[in-house]
Image (cartoon, helix red, strand yellow):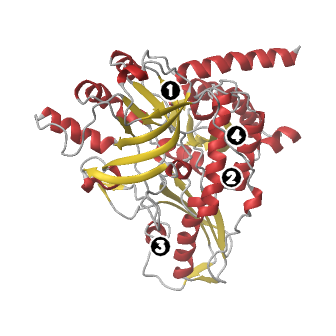
Amino acid sequence: MTVIRQQDFIDSIEDALQFISYYHPLDYVKAVEKAYLKEQSQAAKDAMAQILINSRMSAEGHRPLCQDTGIVTCFVKIGMGVTWDKTDMTVQEMVDEGTRRAYMNPDNPLRASIVADPAGARKNTKDNTPAVVHIDMVPGDHIEVMIAAKGGGSENKSKMVMLNPSDDIAEWVVKTLPLMGAGWCPPGMLGIGIGGTAEKAAVLAKESLMDPVDIQELIERGPQTTEEKLRLDIFNKVNALGIGAQGLGGLTTVVDVKIKSMPTHAASKPVAMIPNCAATRHAHFHLDGTGPAKLEVPKLEDWPEVTWEVGASTRRVNMDTVTKEEIQEWKSGETVLLSGKMLTGRDAAHKRIQTMLDEGKGLPEGVDLTNRFIYYVGPVDAVGDEVVGPAGPTTATRMDKFTDMMLEKTGLIGMIGKAERGPATVKSIAKHKAVYLMAVGGAAYLVSKAIKQARVVAFEDLGMEAIYEFEVKDMPVTVAVDSQGNNAHETGPAIWKAKIEELDAALSK
């Protein structure tokens, strides 16, 4: 019998969560580098360059890759020959204790995003617990742990369907993926679970994302099983959609497709699809009774030397003086470098502003949105001499239902976020002659370096959802929706889908 110390297990959970907050899995880094080198879309290439630069910076600085440091998902496989040195804590409690310590680490605090009473008050638990824990009893005398931190932007795009037994899974994926938008921050991975029951398919999909990136090896040796053939089919068909990095159009939308399956009822074909984002974060370790896990620290020279240069046509904007008339000249798809002061605000702040305006109270003291830009962000707490912690954009569509109100009643002229906007919001932006700018999801630490000053100006009780004022210098963004309603998230993928079809036709001749 192998005796596992509770403390070793807790320490290993804590260490692994800190580790994955700033170290990308190297297989993912190499896959994005490969995609970057072959990419022909400049917008997608620029986005991947920022992702790779951010990855290296996070590895060097031991600070989070993304401001959304995720909900913890942990698969624990316990050998039947294992016993514990104490029996006063459950496995769930031990994972939660490790999570609590990792997220409250004073040297690298991670953003606590978990809320209790999800159907009601939605109050933050303050320590990112509880984790989602899956426990299996397996043969053997050791413990295997696979742990991930999953961002809300990608988790929210999960899809599940009960297909008919004769239905084509790849066809469903190709039909469904464009409906997910770009809020899952491609290029990433797709995890697909097939079989079992509805809830088991979702667990299989999530577990598949723990597997290494190996699609290129599969391509080289050729598929040998039904699942491997399906992986390649989906991989090729999804990338042929032309969605590209950050949804701006390009050759690579996914760097791998993972599949796990199990037997199911003869009348059923449950399928779940869960994407992993550009902040793919997971680690594997074993405990055999000899102490806490030792995670292999990657070498910085394993990261590619990628640079991102500002093009000659890049527009530089001073947000302190820019006018509504000037933003009418900005065109969808162009790169803009922002300097000056902006305000921040996410879901909770927008909801509170709406309530205050509906009650005739006006905006909170110190908040004037006239001719201003608002950034959809919930930053990580600063450490040391940082002005702010990693501060990448959150998914903009969550603010869609507030946008018409904000543009109509506050004097706001621009918004900055991640991924696309909905059709009604695009119409509202055009109606009010405003603009929507997109920052790269998955480049939070890089973005934070453009922020030179930060202070809370309202709703301090909302924590990371408070309204801040940021002063930035040369913060890179893309005009996603211009004042005429031209939408880069529609035009970019459409252009690149057609180009990919032309490239494939030329190769087949």
Instruction: Report the residue at 37% width, 23% height from top.
Output: 434
Instruction: Report the residue at 65% width, 49% height from top.
Output: 53
Residue found at the far front of this picture: 321
Query: Viewed as shown, does residue 131 lie left or right of 289?
Result: left
Q: Amino acid at mark 3?
A: Met
Label 4 packing within 10 angstroms: few (<14), some (14-19), many (20+) = many
Disc 1 element: strand
**In this figure, which residue is indicated by the disc labeled 4?**
255
Q: Examine the image and state in which quarter residue 431 appears.
A: top left
Label 3 packing within 10 angstroms: few (<14), some (14-19), many (20+) = some
Q: Sequence order check: which comes first, mark 3 or mark 2? A: 3
**In this figure, which residue is indicated by the disc labeled 1?**
480
Instruction: Report the residue at 42% width, 23% height from top.
Output: 327
> Disc 3 and disc 2: Cα gap in Å?
24 Å
How many numbered marks are there?
4
Judged by depth in the image, the label closer to the viewer, 1 or 2, is: 1
Label 2 packing within 10 angstroms: few (<14), some (14-19), many (20+) = some
**Residue 270 x, y percent position in the rendering:** 55, 36
